[in-house]
Amino acid sequence: MYIMKHLKMSHWAMRAEAMEDACLSFSLIIPLMENAPTHTNSSSYAAFISYRHLPRDAEVACEVQRAIEEYRLPRLVARANAPAETTSNTACAFPEADAYAEIAHKEAILHTENASIGTTTHNKDTFNAQEHEVRRPTKLGKCFRDEDELAASHSLPDSIREALAASRTLIVICSPETQESSWVRREIEMFEQIHGRERIICVLAAGSPEESIPPILKTRMVPDANGVLREMPAEPLAADLRPEAKTKRKAELLRIIAAVAGCSYDDLRQRERARQCRRMALASAAAALTIAAVGVFAFQFHQTSEAALIAESKSLAAQALDQYDRGEHLQAIETALAALPSSADNPNRPIVPEAQAALEEVLALNPDPDRHWVSLFCIDAKGSIVDIAYSFEGGWLAVLDDTGALSIYDIYTSQPITTESPTLFAVDEDTVPQSDWFIEAISPSHLLLANRTEGGGVSCLLPLTGKEAWNSSRTYALAAAPLDDSSDFAILAYGMHSLGAAFVNCTKGSLEKGLVETPVEQFPQFTNFEAFSAQKNPSTAYYALDTSLVIFDLEEMTCEQRNVSDAMIHSIQAGREIVVFTAADCIGDDINTNQVPFTVRALDTSTDSEEPLWTFNDTYSVTVGTQSGTLLPFNGIPQVRCILHKKESMVAITAGKKLLVFNLKTGELLFSHEFNASIVEVSLCFDSDDSCEFAVALGDGTLDIVNPLMEITLNTDYSATQIPYHIDSASFDIYDTGNPVAFVHPTNRSNRLLCYLFNPYYGEDDIEEFSLEELLAYARSALRYS
């Protein structure tokens, strides 16, 4: 019971800390709200345009202002917080709607005063209709754009502060010189304090996003699983006005208008196109006055329609390539198909070469020499992903999210097999899913579900059917690990005042090796459930308990606890009676986060000696790193990644940006390399007698293959691919083709799981030509197979 109480108290402590931070933020905002001037509806702005007063930026600002102020929204477009179509007493979400209502009311009064004395009842009814029927304004409203350079001052002028408070959105014109403007930064800070981050739009006028978008918009403070606020990357809503092509600029301006109006860009684009079609239809009808005019206008209509379809196909092709870059493989195929005719013999739209090339690329029919990792699929869960488990041999992939939903997919096609909400993962006010729940593939046909909290319990499912094989409500599992070439798995559990380990039969749920326990006075302050390892021969399990190593001998039914470290143990792995662990203290005011000491140590568990076989000491960085001005997520706690039993057994270690490979028995450093970003995951993917290669995932979105025995692989980056995400966690395995496959969890898309296959191009394959009919057949087959 003490352990349960401790867990609940730690949960409440984290929540209290988060509430304290929220109250502090709120207390900072209240004075601003109290001192902010009162604005009437008539003085509100659709947008405040912030820019550096340079000719190029000013020109783009004027272009954006004209587009917003002159644009009329199509009828029935779905707008966020849109005011009612007909109302006289209901408050509108957009302030200018009240102004329109007031004007309509005044016009109705003037109409009544100018009417003759013999006004009929019909006129009175008309007046009432005018009073009550107030249409939502089709125009977005005025924009505020300061045309004068602001004087040197430490605070914003009152006119600017009032305009920011009265503006619904903030548009920041971004160029390489924007970051030099302190006024732009202050306008962003004030708007964010008043209205929040979600209503800020970045418009790229020149330069790359890394050098043009202000740093304040690239990051946000996000609580981690322990409730500690960390500075994490953010992706601001942005539009690109760098291209000179008219079609592209119109599309980007429409994207800005949709953001200001609070409506879906796709919805607005479709309704804009429908409005254009209606106008074209009216023009065609008017052209029917004479036979000659009908012919002329029909020809013009055909030309205009064909040009519009060509432009649309090019836009869809670009969208398909963007989806493919983001890992949305199947969506990219569907979008590319929409850009092409349904048949080459009976085309319903022009054949655009850009669209045909896009479909060929997203189908990966010809290898791309610059893309060594190709997207297989992406999965979007209902909530933030808590844990994944999979088996290529079993053909399934399991995804658990923080809503308690467990979804099973076909691992080769990404098609859903079943979705359930197990009672084991019920959500209540004390639940912290990221630390309370876990799932583990314990065999190709068995999936273990476990809840570490007071409710506790474990359950074993048959993933392909969703049926429960067995459950144990009395088992409070902390961690589980499958055993190689065995139908058993190892489990770490806790009792009232003890920790225990056992081997369990995955088919029956019965104990194969009896439970061995060790007493603990209290539950460890810092629990690291990943620091659990087991091996079948000899039957032994290991767990890192703070700075101690707990050894469970399941043959002799004994347990011992050795104090083997001066720092917190973070990772542990066993290999043939040699245990390797990493340790570091990452908490404390006196810790220099750029130079955190860590230790790698090997122990011979076959003897009673407490002296280590060898020890290696070094430092690593735990700060958020940057690359090309972009913040990278926090990763890199020292971890033992794998043990290789070759002629000379080796062990691979990662710490921050460093990859280290040691001789397992002597501790000789065989290889070391420091990457440009924190290492998220390293896994052995190719192994032979004289070579070994590792798959590597870095926090900046880099996927790579490195060979510690071949330095050239690190110098040429022949296999590196940059995906458009920061990576929070990743795992590697071997696909049925024999190539590595990566499962990636992005930092900025917590509900998304991506799958990439290593498929390098070595320049030996001939480029194959495909006809349109062949491409269409390949695409439809891929969608049917999925």
Image (tube, rainbow, N blue to C red):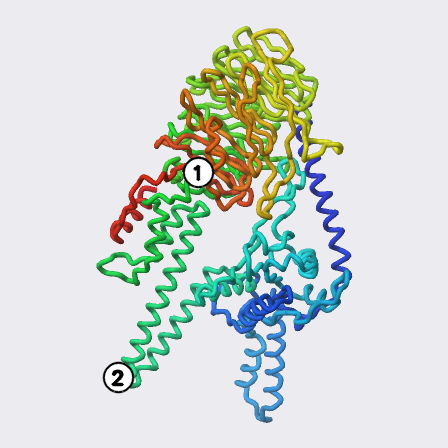
Looking at this rendering, what residue extends furthest in the bottom direction? 117
Q: Which residue is mark 1?
A: 718
Instruction: Tell me which amino acid carries mark 2.
Output: Ile
Q: Nearer the viewer, residue 768 or 537?
A: 768
Within-10-Å neighbours for mark 1: few <14, some 14–19, many 20+: some
Q: Quadrant of residue 276?
A: bottom left
Along the line of sight, which residue is nearer the eye, 486 or 567? 567
Residue 1 is at least partly visible in this image: no
Q: Circle 2: is it few (<14), some (14-19), or many (20+) Cα within 10 Å?
A: few
Res. 685 image quadrant? top left
At 62% from the left and 16% from the top, the residue drawn is 549
| Residue 722 image position (x, y, % from top left) | 48, 43
Of mark 1 and mark 2, the one earlier in the sequence is: 2
Of the residues tagged 1 and 2, which is closer to the observer?
Answer: 1
> On residue 291, which mark appears?
2
- Rendering coords of residue 491 (x, y %): 53, 20
The residue under label 1 is which amino acid type? Tyr
